[in-house]
Structure formats: structure tokens, C-alpha cells
Image (cartoon, rainbow, N blue to C red):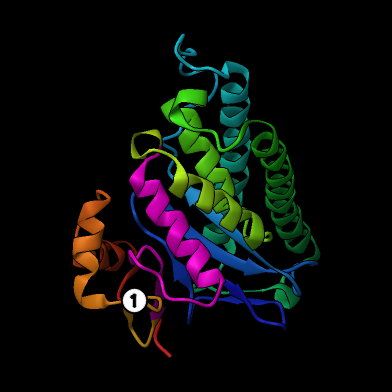
């Protein structure tokens, strides 16, 4: 959901990234109204620290556990925010000016929790990357590497850092990174840099239908998606339509 300057979150041109397991909701604010940031809900496939014992083959087990713990905070804050939006939003919109004092306080508290989690996670991930390089599967395990990726996906306030992490992932051996995760981050960074996405992981709804955000060489997108383990784009349009309807109408 994108925040208008008047404080209204609308989905007339909402951006949704629905590649299982994710759904993106966009808001703006710096204060909430002035700086763009991102709310993501990932139906979490990342194990928490207590769910999966550390593997003996992981070189940085403590870092792995920390990354998993940070994802837990990330997910909890987003689940709470989106649950509130589903209960109190009207047709995909929330006008802060129309909220009661209590509802506005709830909204601001939940939004602040997401913003705080993102800022702290971005800062800490930056320290980890500076000390150890990008957290690969060898360093932190498959789940730890996926957790690191999810955290950088949520670092939209620092596109330069996202680009740095993306470049590190690209340079890593293919078996050290999820190529699906890499596709997500590639699209995220390209769009943030004002370029076209490659894999069609970012959607927008407008005029009653779902469409990918600006896409390079659309004719070959399904070929590129298949190469990184993603199904055809048309399948995700159907998922979007089944879960969200036919998109917001102007």
C-alpha cells in the first residue's frame, strides 16, 4: 500500500509481490507521511532459532541463530500490522485523519514496530556482512541464508545496501544461494533504481487487473523465471485474482 501525502493508504496502485511465500504491502512515512518504507508479510518458511538445531557443518552457528531470531521479530511485527489493516481498513484504504484517537494510536504503534525492526535488522545485517561477507549456506546454513535474504528484502530505506548485498549474492557460487531469493532481490533493487525488473516478482493492481510492474523483455520472462525455479507469470495472476479479486479499479 502506498501512502498518499494526505495520510491515506490506498491500493489503487498497490504493489504486491506474491511469489509464495510472500505478500508485500507498501506504506510511506519517515514520519509515516514523508519517507517510503515497506511492510512485508512473508508466510514464514524461515525456521525460528528454536525450531531447527544448528548443523555441525555451519561455520557461523551463532550468526545463524541471530538471523533466525531477527526474522521472528520481523514476522511478528508484520503479522500484527496486516491483521490490524484487515480488521480496520476499508476497501484497502486507511485514512489516518478519520481514525479515532485510540485507533490512530494503535496504527502508529504497529507501524513504528515494523519500522524499528527494519532499521535495527538492516543495521545489524550490515555489521554481519562487513565482518563475514554475505551469509551463505556454508556460513549460516540454508535457513540462515534465507533469513539474511529476507532481512535485506526489507531494507528498502537503504537501496545502496540492498545493491551491495545483491552484488555479493551474484558473485557467490550458485549452490551457496537460493536462485529464487536472488531473483526477488534483483527485481526489488532494479525497480528501486528506476530500472525494469527481470523476473516479474513485483505486481501492481490498477484498472481492475493485476500486472507486473515495469518488466524487461516480457516475452521471455517465463523462461527466466523457470531458470530460477519460479512458475509461469500467468499462474501468479490467477493466485492474485483468487486471493485479492481482479485488482483495484480506478
Quadrant that contains the C terminus: bottom left
Asked whether 221 or 201 is in front, the reply is 221
**Is residue 190 part of the magenta span, yes or no?**
yes
Q: Quadrant of residue 212?
A: bottom left
Quadrant that contains the N terminus: bottom right
Which residue lies at the image location 27% right of the left edge and 51% below the top edge?
Answer: 228
Residue corresponding to mark 1: 216
**Residue 34 x/y as whole percent:** 76, 74
- Seen in the picture, residue 84 relative to 171 is either above or below; the reply is below
Which residue lies at the image location 50% right of the left edge and 76% below the top edge?
Answer: 11
**Is residue 235 at least partly visible in the picture?**
no
Tally the marks.
1
- Seen in the picture, residue 212 relative to 20 is either above or below; the reply is below
Q: Quadrant of residue 16?
A: bottom left
**Residue 231 x/y as whole percent:** 21, 55
The residue positioned farthest toward the bottom in the image shown = 250
Within 10 Å of disc 1 (Cα), the crowding (few <14, some 14-19, many 20+) is some
Asked whether 221 or 175 is in front, the reply is 175
**Residue 163 x/y as whole percent:** 57, 58
- Seen in the picture, residue 86 relative to 33 is either above or below; the reply is above
Asked whether 160 or 102 is in front, the reply is 160
**Residue 203 x/y as whole percent:** 39, 70
- Seen in the picture, residue 113 relative to 212 is either above or below; the reply is above
Which residue lies at the image location 63% right of the left edge and 62% below the top edge?
Answer: 159
The residue positioned farthest toward the top in the image shown = 56
**Is residue 2 at least partly visible in the picture?**
yes
Left/right of residue 119 with respect to residue 20 in the rendered view: right
The magenta-colored residue range is 177-205
Which residue lies at the image location 72% right of the left edge and 61% below the top edge?
Answer: 103
Q: Secondary structure at mark 1?
A: loop
Amino acid at each position: 500500500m502506498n501512502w498518499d501525502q494526505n495520510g491515506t493508504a490506498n491500493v489503487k496502485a498497490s504493489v504486491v509481490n506474491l511469489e509464495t511465500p510472500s505478500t508485500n504491502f507498501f506504506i510511506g512515512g519517515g514520519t509515516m507521511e514523508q519517507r517510503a518504507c515497506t511492510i512485508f508479510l512473508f508466510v514464514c518458511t524461515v525456521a525460528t532459532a528454536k525450531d531447527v538445531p544448528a548443523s555441525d557443518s555451519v561455520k557461523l552457528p551463532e550468526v545463524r541463530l541471530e538471523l533466525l531470531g531477527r526474522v521472528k521479530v520481523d514476522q511478528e511485527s508484520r503479522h500484527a500490522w496486516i491483521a490490524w489493516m484487515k480488521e480496520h481498513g476499508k476497501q484497502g484504504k486507511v485514512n489516518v485523519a478519520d481514525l479515532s484517537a485510540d485507533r490512530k494510536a494503535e496504527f502508529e504503534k504497529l507501524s513504528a514496530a515494523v519500522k524499528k525492526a527494519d532499521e535495527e535488522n538492516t543495521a545489524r545485517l550490515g555489521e554481519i556482512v562487513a565482518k563475514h561477507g554475505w551469509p551463505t549456506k556454508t556460513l549460516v546454513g540454508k535457513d540462515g541464508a534465507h533469513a539474511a535474504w529476507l532481512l535485506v528484502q526489507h531494507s528498502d530505506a537503504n537501496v545502496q545496501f540492498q545493491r551491495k548485498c545483491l552484488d555479493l549474492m551474484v558473485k557467490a557460487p550458485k549452490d551457496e544461494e537460493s536462485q529464487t531469493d536472488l531473483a526477488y532481490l534483483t527485481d526489488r533493487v532494479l525497480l528501486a533504481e528506476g530500472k525494469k525488473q527481470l523476473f516479474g516478482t513485483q505486481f501492481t493492481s490498477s484498472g481492475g487487473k493485476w500486472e507486473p510492474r515495469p518488466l524487461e523483455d516480457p516475452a521471455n520472462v517465463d523462461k527466466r523465471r523457470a531458470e530460477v525455479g519460479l512458475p509461469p507469470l500467468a499462474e501468479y495472476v490467477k493466485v492474485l485474482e483468487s486471493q485479492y479479486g481482479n485488482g483495484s479499479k480506478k
